[in-house]
Amino acid sequence: MSFRSMIDEWFADRVEEDHQVREVFTVEPDQPLTFSSDLGIGELGLSCCEGEEARLDASYSKTPPQIKYKGQHLKVFQDTKGFKPWKKDKQRWSIYVPRNNSFHLNLNLGAGNSTIDLKELELRKLKISCGIGDCHLHFTNIKVTQDIPVKIDGGVGNQVIHLSDDVPAVIQVNKGMGKFNGENLIPQGSGRYCTRAYQQGRPHMKMKLNVGVGDVSVRRQAELIKSESV
């Protein structure tokens, strides 16, 4: 491709409108649902909904998201085949999952901001690889009926983990180049922290946090609500 063609394509991207797509999936009630995502460039939002259907609302400017659903396993990913770095290919994904199911989540975030709202979900396992953008993780009123393994790999952007006071959790922090701030956690030594709701021998969230280049902070959900009301 000539340089002039690249410039023409670059300008064409600036005036192209977003496309919309919606996909709805019926899931088996009371059965674990596995959801995985692989986002290249764009924004991801995940939250729960009522009913027995999972839903994806997506907007994109160039390449539609690829969606696969089979046997309680939903996978959404961005096809990067033939990707050209000068092209403006915006992706915005909003994922809604049923409140009454339990979940295994594997999220690979890319170059964009993400908000993962796990409020009132029954997690079985969670793995998140953060990308370049900022990421907000909300753990509020999580149903902890068994030990929940959680692994978070920090990226270049900043990560904020919002924990409500009623979530029992132990957090093992492996520091990288970024800073870690867990001022509301109880330090136990050797990079290990716990929440006030944690009781030894009782079910809890077992979080392994690998700090990357960006900063990572853990905030109480009560502080978040207060700051938003100001």
Image (tube, helix red, strand yellow):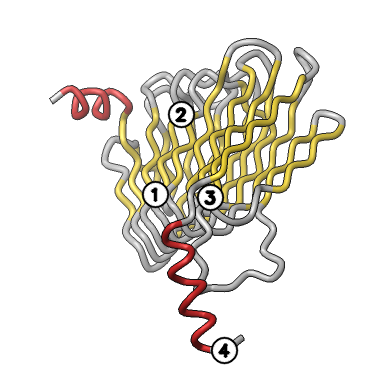
Q: Earlier in the sequence, mark 2 or mark 4?
A: 4
60 horizontally vs 211: left or right: right
Vertical relation: 31 (above or below) 83 = above
Q: Earlier in the sequence, mark 4 or mark 1?
A: 4
Number of other residues with Cα within 10 Å of mark 4, as a class: few under 14, some 14 to 19, many 20 or more: few
At 42% from the left edge and 49% from the top edge, which residue is drawn?
113
Camera-nearest label, 2 or 4: 4
Q: Earlier in the sequence, mark 2 or mark 3?
A: 3
At 71% from the left edge and 67% from the top edge, which residue is drawn?
81
Number of other residues with Cα within 10 Å of mark 2, as a class: few under 14, some 14 to 19, many 20 or more: many
Secondary structure of the residue carrying numbered label 3? strand
At 52% from the left edge and 27% from the top edge, which residue is drawn?
47
Q: CA distance from mark 3 to mark 4?
A: 27 Å
Q: CA distance from mark 1 to mark 2?
A: 13 Å
Q: CA distance from mark 4 to mark 1?
A: 40 Å
Type of amino acid under label 2:
Phe
